[in-house]
Image (spheres, rainbow, N blue to C red):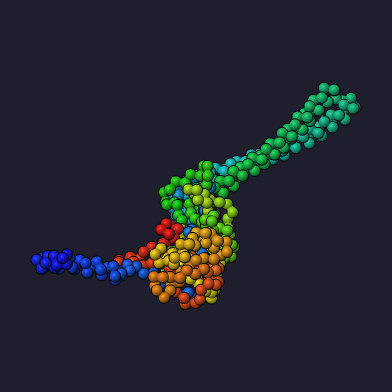
Amino acid sequence: MIITRSLAWIRLHPVISGLIALVVIAILYKVIIPSPATYEYVTEPVSRGEVARIVSASGKLRALNTINVGSEISGQVTDVYVDFNSPVTAGQVLAQIDPTRIEARVTQARAQVASARATLAQAEASIIRAQTDYEVQSREFERQQQLADKGFVSKAGIDQARNALANARASLSTAKAQAQSGRAGIAQSEAELSSAQLDLNRTRIVAPTSGVVINKLVEPGTTVAASFQTPNLFEIAADTSRMQVEASVDEADIGQVRVDQLVRFTVDSYPDDTFVAKVGQIRKSATEEQNVVSYLVILDVDNKEGKLLTGMTANVEIVTGTRTNVLRIPAPAIRFRPRKDDRPEEETKDPVKPADEKSKKTNTAQIWVAGDDPYEPVRRTVTIGLAGEDFVEIIKGVKEKEKILVRSKSLENEEDEEDEDEFARGNT
């Protein structure tokens, strides 16, 4: 009865009946035939090659020996004879400070020396006169003494001769003292002259060593004030064929860095070139900025080609360990986890987090190997060796050329999905 009524209703409403039939067929198609996947897994084969453990840092290029050239006197700079990047030799004049005031001091000091020498000459002449007078008075006193013994000269005459002798002796002593003072005056005047001549020489700013001018801080007309500290006028790099990089290494990585380790670095000026250096020194004094502690590592750089310039920013990679000709897999494979629906059921019975904590102690890790079905990967426990930034050494657990899952890729758009860590996703 129901079937008869249904058939009658279908005959009376053919269009509606057709639409209902299409909807039912579409539903059955969706249920019976599954929809195509919207993603796929990207794999990489297990390969053999080099694994390098890298500590990344950044730093500035500096000249191996930079000398600041300053002025010890004040004055106005009248001439500058060098410019940036000018090669200089030791003793070469770099700049000239106005010497007028210093030259006047030198002239005055020379006049004082001449005056002191004239005073000394007068004192020495006084000594000769006083010496002659003393000798005359000595002989006169002796004669008066002899005459007094014979009774020809009174006692007053003897006293007068003795007094004249004493005055002559005092005059001689005074003349000698004046001569000694004159010599001291000459020494003082000559010292002042030497000081003035030294300051005059210092008006010529000279290079203390050979090198290249990397910084110029003065121009003609600049007034130099050296009252409290020596102002810097030039910076000279003594040898630009050898340079150094001052790299800041994070405290978490400094324990891996050793002296003489190989270093690779790049600079923005030559993005396609890789430069080689080695660790020369590890400074033990820590630097803290915004609660981040770092240590200064000095890298020795060969710059014979002259490409590198002071102040360039270096992107540094310190090679703290290498393995050659070993089995390796891409580093992202260690962190990657397939989607929850694609993992075997036993995965939910064996929580990953405890396994990972155990892996840290036993140096093992969980990776996923492509199976026969691309959406049913196989979990594999591997023993890892050296872990680098791009590759991880595999000691055992996989074979060469096996395909390892490294990330997932969306098929609905052109952008790849980000690698998902199981714990970060929180959908396990």
Residue 292 in the image: state x and y as whole percent.
50, 51
In this picture, residue 116 sits left or right of residue 303? right
Please say if 256 is above or below 162.
Answer: below
Residue in view at x 61 percent, y 45 percent: 190
Of 78 and 114, the residue lying toward us: 78
Q: Quadrant of residue 18?
A: bottom left
419 or 75: nearer the viewer: 419
In-image side of 185 versus 24 (left or right): right
Residue 269, position as x, y percentages in the image? 41, 64
Who's the residue at 55% across and 61% down the image? 358
Residue 395 horizontal/vertical position (percent)? 55, 71
**As drawn, which residue projects farthest toward the left?**
12
Seen from the viewer's position, the closer of residues 249 and 208 is 249
Q: Is residue 258 visible?
A: yes
Classify the position of the C terminus by image quarter.
bottom left
Residue at screen point 45% across, 52% down: 217
Single out the residue that lies furthest toward the bottom.
401
Which residue is at 41% across, 75% downward? Answer: 372
Spot occupied by residue 222 in the image (x, y as percentages of width and height): 43, 48
Identify whether 22 is placed above or below 167. Answer: below
| Depth check, front residue: 39 or 347 | 347
Q: Is residue 193 above or below residue 297?
A: above
Position above or below: 338 against 112: below
Q: From this viewpoint, which residue is outermost toward the front?
A: 1
